[in-house]
Image: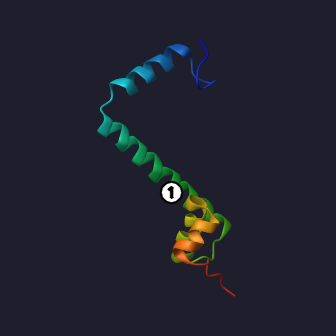
Amino acid sequence: MTTLSPDTSPQIERIQIEGLRQMPPWRKLALVGDMNEAVHALALAGLRQRYPDDTPAQRRRRLADLVLGPELATRVYGPLQEDG
């Protein structure tokens, strides 16, 4: 049997999958929410590094570009307000 992740042994992957199957739906949703928060935090950290002079509002707007795509983010939030 091939594994879903090349760095995980088949035995460990079976244990992980069985744990997910036994997990109640509310817990799975909570894990997805936690992962989304982590992804947003990492994206914001990257934006802080690339655009250190941005205001918090500009950073949130750039995050919207990443999450929604530039076209939809512009339609929803308006254009990104650049300094200068």
| Rendered location of residue 60, percent (x, y) | 52, 70
Give above or below for 63 relative to 23.
Answer: below
Q: Is residue 37 visible?
A: yes
Residue at mark 1: 41
Placement of the C terminus among the 4 image quadrants? bottom right
Residue nearest the observer in this picture, 61 or 50: 61
Q: Quadrant of residue 4?
A: top right
Residue nearest the observer in this picture, 33 or 78: 78
Residue at x 52% of width, y 72% of height: 76
Q: Which residue lies most toward the right here?
A: 84
Give above or below for 2 relative to 63.
Answer: above
- Number of other residues with Cα within 10 Å of mark 1, as a class: few under 14, some 14 to 19, many 20 or more: few
| Rendered location of residue 8, percent (x, y) | 57, 22
Placement of the N terminus among the 4 image quadrants? top right
Residue nearest the observer in this picture, 55 or 14: 14
Q: Which residue lies most toward the bottom here?
A: 84
Q: What residue type is labelled 1?
A: Ala
Residue at x 37% of width, y 37% of height: 28
Residue nearest the observer in this picture, 48 or 66: 66
Residue at x 50% of width, y 13% of height: 11
Disc tally is 1
Label 1: element kind: helix
